[in-house]
Structures are given as structure tokens and as C-alpha cells.
Amino acid sequence: MKVLVTGGMGYIGSHTCVQMIEAGMTPIIFDNLYNSKATVLPRLENLTGAAPKFVQGDIRDKALLVETMREHAIEAVIHFAGLKAVGESVQKPLEYYDNNVNGTLVLVDAMREVGIKSLVFSSSATVYGDPASVPILESFPTSATNPYGRSKLMVEECLTDFQTANPDWSITLLRYFNPVGSHPSGDLGEDPQGIPNNLMPFISQVAVGRREHLSVFGSDYPTHDGTGVRDYIHVMDLADGHIAALNKVGNKSGLHIYNLGTGNGLSVLDMVKAFEAASDKEIPYQLVDRRQGDIAECWADPSKARKELEWSADRTVDEMTRDTWNWQSKNPQGYPDL
């Protein structure tokens, strides 16, 4: 199967491309390199023995999308491309809506023109807002607390309306919880530009000496140690979830919605301790005030994906932290520039 992977040079996209190649699929990567590096490509080839086709372009460029889809006889699309920093989205809401919402509409319009009717969308648990209870089911009400989350929710609503009007399409919404870890080789990993927005890359940059300490936002939540609790999922398990979605429902018309998580909640300090054990490094941290919009706890009920996709997140927190440290210690400054 030939699959267009938008944002395929990014963190989750690159790991998914590896697993796709291992599964016998052919990813064609479409990425503007805004938040990723071209040096990912040779690493993908070294890991898999295959050189994925790469087209540098923006998902708002319909003509280039149509040309790429036709040239490579694309059969399905996995859509990762998007801006993803919560704080930045508050400062630049228009850019987020243009890139994430408008970009998706252009992509779907290009698919419609070419006749491709299978789409897997990279959504987020942020669409649940502040859930009334945990674990979170796909049937829970949705809301958003920031422009990033709202852009994901808007895309979900647009795709839902589009699928209703075009019932022969297969559209899958994968709601990720908190991706962490890296390829076990240490050759692929999370390489955020600037100050990390997510916990694990921040911890690993402290461990490798790039940052002095970790700021823990909030120590008075109603959790077992006062810090926020999240559902951390290994990026390789997440990658496998996309392949399962393509295999199980990619050719099945309808709207398909799945949580991708472990079903277990771990606190910030739980993750710090696990990383210290994996790296044999002390992680100095400071307890600071809560961030606006953060919630106390959030973890998935992944039983629907387990039943319908025959998928589950099996890698442990020890593997998550070990693989993260393997990546960061081998690549202390992240991916090199060309």
C-alpha cells in the first residue's frame, strides 16, 4: 500500500514510517521541514534499508499535493502535519487555524480531486478538555482550552461533517495521549525546536546538560504526589496504532474514532524517577505554579482500539525512559543540520 504521510519527517511521523516499511507499506513523505530536519531521511534509510520518497511542500499547496498523489499512485493518507505547541498557539492563533484547520481542508480537497477516500488523522486527547472523570472514553464530550486543542477539535468536526456527506469515505480520528520514547536504536527521537513544550524531552535535555533544571508546573493537584497525571505512551506503540488503523478500518467506510493510550496514569514525578533510574542521572527540578489550562489527570480507556483494531500499547515506562535516554545521549543536540 502506498500511503502519503504528511509531516512524516516529524517525531511521530518518522517513527510511523519505520513501522510502515517494516509492515510492507510504502510511505511517501510530504513535509515542509518547519519543525523537523532533512537529516531524518538518511536515518530512516539506515534503519529500514529502504529510502522513502520525500516531497518538500506545504499541505496548503493543493497543486503540489495533487501532483504528488497522482505521481505516486497514493491509496491512503496519514495526516500528521500541523503546528503543535499549546503556548505558541495562544500567541499565534491565526497561524494555528490556518495551518492546522485550513491545511487539512486543502489536503482533503486534494484527496477528493484525485479520488483517494482513506484518511487517518493525528488528533489529540486535548479534544476532551478537562474531563469530568477518568479513564476517558471516546464517547466523552469534547471541548478545548486553547487554540491548539481547538484547532484539533475543529478538524475533527470538519472531517465528521465531510464523512457524513461522503459516506463512502473512511476517516479515522486517532486521539493520542502523551507520546514519549524513541526508536530503540537511538537514531530517531523527539527533537523539539527551542525550549521543549513536553515533559520527556525537557527531562532528557536536563540529563544531558543542555538545561539546568526541570520546572514542575503545579504540586497541589489532587493526585498521589500533587503533580499532574498523564497517560504516557511509547511512540513505537503509537506508530503501530496507525498501521493497525490502516489495516483494520482504512478500507472500511465510516467515521472511526479511537483513543491511543496505555490506560495507566503516571505523575510528573513518577516520570522523573523512572528517567533517573534509566539514565543513572539526577534530574534537579523546581516546583512552580500551575500553568493556565493544565488539568489534574488525564488517561485513556483504550479498550475500543484493543477490540476493534486488535492493538494495544505494550511497552513499559522503563522502555519509554530507557529509549528516550538512548536517543538523547547519542544525539545530545538533537538531529544535526544539513
Image (cartoon, rainbow, N blue to C red):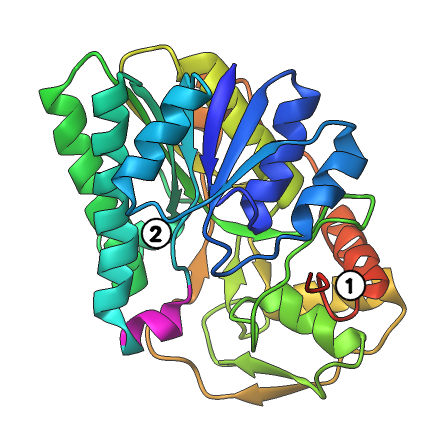
Query: Depth-wise, is mark 1 or mark 2 nearer the camera?
Result: 1
**Gap in angstroms between the C-alphas marked 1 and 2:** 35 Å
Mark 1 surroundings within 10 Å by alpha-carbon count, few (fewer than 14), some (14 through 19), many (20 or more): many
Q: Is residue 195 left or right of residue 78?
A: right
- The disc, 1 or 2, on the residue closer to the chain's N-terminal end is 2
Q: Amino acid at mark 1?
A: Gln
- Image x and y of residue 335, in percent: 71, 61
Q: Amino acid at mark 2?
A: Ser
Residue at the (12%, 32%) spot, across then down: 161
* Residue 24's disc number: none
78 to 34, vertically: above or below: above
Q: Secondary structure at mark 2?
A: loop
Residue 86 forms part of the magenta stretch: yes
Asked if residue 285 can be seen in this view, the reply is yes
- Quadrant for the C terminus in the image: bottom right
* Residue 328's disc number: 1
Residue at the (45%, 70%) spot, across then down: 222
Which quadrant would residue 208 be assigned to in this image?
bottom right
Q: Is residue 129 left or right of residue 165?
A: right
Q: Closest to the observer: 82 or 122?
A: 82
Tags 1 and 2 touching, CB below 8 Å: no
Q: Closest to the observer: 229 or 320?
A: 320
Residue at the (37%, 11%) spot, across then down: 251
Number of labels in the image equals: 2
Mark 2 surroundings within 10 Å by alpha-carbon count, few (fewer than 14), some (14 through 19), many (20 or more): few
The residue stretch that appears in magenta: 85-90
Asked if residue 309 can be seen in this view, the reply is no
Q: Secondary structure at mark 1?
A: helix
Dot 2 corresponds to which residue?
133
